[in-house]
Image: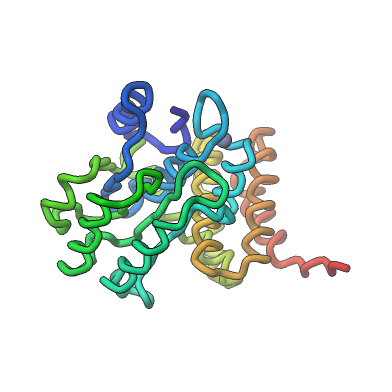
Amino acid sequence: MNLSLLVGNERVKEQLSQQERGRGLSHAYIISGPAGSGKHILANLLAKAMLCTSKSGRPCGRCGPCRKVEKGMHPDVSIITGPAEGKPITVDQVRTLRADSYIRPNEGERKVYLLEGADKMNAPAQNAMLKLLEEGPRYAVFLLIAGNNGALLQTVRSRCEELALTPAGRGEDSGDQSELAKKLAGALSRAEELELFEASMELAGKRNREELSALLDALEVELTACAAQGGDRRRLIRAVDLVRELRSAARLNVNAGQLSGWLCAGIFTPFPERD
Ligand SMILES: [Zn+2]
């Protein structure tokens, strides 16, 4: 498997690669770990891997399905969040999800459901989820994102493969890297000038080329997540384009200070009129 976008966590990468080579990827994963450990990066990679049409090195990141997942536009990938900010997924939502899962995939071989804050679901919701894990259709894949896997019922855990992530890399760096990516994505999606300026100043800190490009990768994933959660699509797609431009520039040895200036300037240039 091609999981190079996930920083560190070699053991988890090896676990998944072995599984893919052996009996194939599972239909249910619990992706757990503290904030900044790369849970969403891994979930995004797994969703792509499930739908990627490349023969090897999945996810390839280049085929049609990979690109659609990346843009949050693949019809066979659903992200389920609670009914309101900070509210956990409810039993009714799990029932709706269950009904939806019995409708065959639109385009791919599989349907992927990503459940945010799965560890916050109450017991009835978790039990409904358990039923789905036990009896759901074969093409359905469930990715349960959990800050604390200990809060999931043992019965649910026993039905899933557990992928426990740790903030990896050099000391505090990569944890702080994905925090920064989140901050930047939030600022970009809200177009908060001050917030973005502050986050960019952090970006301008001492970062080598490798760290910078890992940060830009993480930022792209975060922006895609924002778009999938109903952010301003036009602005977010533009931000993703901008990040891609920045990434090619980062390869050409531009420093972080220049990049942050570019990011700020790019996002606040008025939108070109479309005809
Ligand atoms: Zn692909």
The coloring applied to the image is rainbow
User: Residue 222's spot in the image, x, y percent?
Assistant: 50, 55
Q: Is residue 195 above or below residue 15?
A: below
Q: Residue at x 18, y 62 (%)?
A: 127
How many marks do you count on the picture?
0
| Residue at the spot 52% in from the left edge and 62% down from the top edge | 228
| Quadrant containing the N terminus in the rendered view | top left
Q: Is residue 104 left or right of residue 53?
A: left
Q: Does residue 237 lie above or below 164 as drawn? A: below
Q: Give the camera-side residue of 144 and 271.
A: 144
> Quick one: which residue is furthest to the right in this view?
275
Q: Nearer the viewer, residue 210 or 54?
A: 54
Observer-nearest of 34 and 250: 34
Q: Position of residue 249 (x, y in %)?
A: 69, 40
Taking the view exactly as shown, the residue that stands out farthest to the bottom is: 84
Which percent across, then down, holds residue 103? Answer: 45, 57
The quadrant where residue 166 appears:
top left
In the figure, is residue 72 to the left or right of 79? right
* Residue at the spot 47% in from the left edge and 29% down from the top edge: 2
Q: Visible in this render: residue 170?
A: no
Is any atom of residue 233 visible in this view? Answer: yes
The residue that appears at 62% across and 53% down in the rendered structure is: 260
Give whichever of 96, 266 is nearer the camera. Answer: 96
Which quarter of the rendering shows the C terminus? Answer: bottom right
Above or below — where is 32 with respect to 3? below
Could you say where residue 33 lies in the image, as x and y percent from the top left?
26, 49
Quadrant of ligand 1: it is top right
Left or right, 108 with respect to 79, comes to right
